[in-house]
Image (cartoon, rainbow, N blue to C red):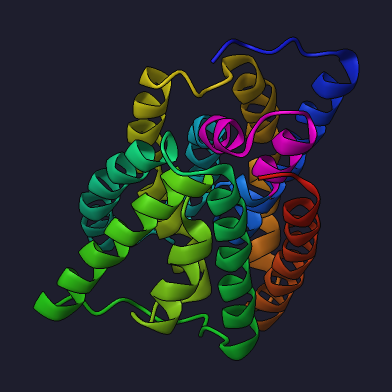
């Protein structure tokens, strides 16, 4: 893929999206791909180029966002390690198919993905004091969750937080804050692995990734502080509303763009 020329409007848009992605990354424990991908498509990138570039931007974003959670003791390290085992393998699988699947499949796959996430946010509220009980069954489940997350992360250009955060609370009993911190730590190896593969396939716009990723770093601490201040229920509802807005936007884009 040749690197596209970025005009002033595109640069401003990328920086603003980076600031928003950083805030949401710290607040919700996500990489920010759910807003980065649609924004890059709006700037003129194809769905697969946007997904690959988004994953590259998520690397510095999640790295900065996880630091406050680590300092506050809001990371389940063993669970994160088990998730990473699956994520790294899944990211390679997803990146392999990203270069081969039709654009229409990717666009509507993103729509379906957002719909599932939105529903989950309104059906379940995590407990603020919940912890992850590790045993052989939960360990295997975490690896399986990581595998699924890695595939979706590479295919859709998301860090995987929108899968892992609700799953860690709903299935494994983690508190909302531990789920967020663990998610941010988990997504780093998968994002790096998927980005390396996407770079080999010449799908990553490095300038766009930098324009988004660097401003995001400055905003992540504010998102983390806000997550600590808000209740678990309010955090969940806000995330659900956010995903519904993204869902409406993604359906609009999928209907308007040709196959």
Rendered residue at 57%/30% (across/down): 49
Is residue 215 visible in the rendered image? The answer is yes
Q: Observer-nearest residue: 67 or 113?
A: 113
Could you say which quadrant of the image residue 16 lies in? top right
* Image quarter hosting the C terminus: top right
Is residue 224 visible in the rendered image? The answer is no
Q: Give the residue furthest to the bottom.
A: 123
Q: Give the residue furthest to the front.
A: 259
Up-down relation of residue 179 to residue 54 (above or below): below
Rendered residue at 66%/22% (across/down): 208
Q: Position of residue 61 (x, y in %)?
A: 56, 37
Up-down relation of residue 129 to residue 238 (above or below): below
Q: Observer-nearest residue: 4 or 180?
A: 4
Could you say which quadrant of the image residue 121 lies in? bottom right
Classified by dominant secondary structure, the portion drawn in magenta counts as helix
The answer to whether 55 appears left or right of 191 in the picture is: right
The answer to whether 109 appears left or right of 151 in the picture is: right
Up-down relation of residue 10 to residue 239 (above or below): above
Q: Position of residue 13 (x, y in %)?
A: 83, 30
Q: Give the residue furthest to the left.
A: 136
Rendered residue at 72%/44% (across/down): 258
Q: Is 202 contained in the magenta span?
A: no
Q: Is 46 contained in the magenta span?
A: yes
Magenta-highlighted residues: 35-54
* Image quarter hosting the N terminus: top right
Q: Position of residue 15 (x, y in %)?
A: 78, 27
Q: Position of residue 103 (x, y in %)?
A: 57, 43
């Amino acid at each position: 893929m040749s690197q596209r020329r970025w005009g002033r409007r595109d640069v401003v848009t990328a920086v603003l999206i980076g600031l928003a992605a950083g805030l949401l990354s710290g607040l919700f424990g996500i990489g920010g791909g759910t807003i980065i991908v649609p924004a890059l498509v709006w700037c003129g990138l194809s769905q697969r180029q946007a997904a690959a570039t988004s994953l590259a931007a998520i690397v510095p974003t999640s790295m900065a966002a996880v630091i406050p959670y680590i300092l506050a003791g809001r990371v389940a390290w063993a669970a994160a390690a088990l998730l990473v085992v699956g994520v790294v393998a899944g990211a390679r699988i997803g990146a392999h198919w990203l270069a081969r699947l039709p654009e229409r499949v990717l666009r509507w796959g993103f729509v379906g993905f957002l719909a599932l996430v939105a529903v989950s946010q309104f059906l379940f509220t995590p407990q603020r004091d919940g912890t992850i009980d590790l045993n052989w069954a939960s360990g295997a489940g975490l690896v399986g969750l990581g595998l699924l997350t890695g595939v979706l992360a590479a295919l859709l250009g998301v860090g995987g937080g929108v899968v892992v955060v609700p799953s860690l609370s709903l299935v494994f009993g983690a508190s909302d804050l531990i789920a967020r911190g663990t998610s941010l730590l988990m997504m780093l190896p998968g994002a790096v692995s998927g980005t390396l593969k996407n770079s080999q396939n010449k799908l990553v716009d490095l300038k766009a990734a930098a324009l988004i990723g660097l401003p995001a770093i400055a905003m992540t601490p504010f998102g983390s502080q806000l997550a600590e201040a808000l209740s678990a229920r309010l955090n969940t509802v806000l995330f659900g509303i956010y995903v519904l807005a993204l869902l409406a936007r993604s359906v609009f884009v999928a209907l308007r763009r040709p196959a």
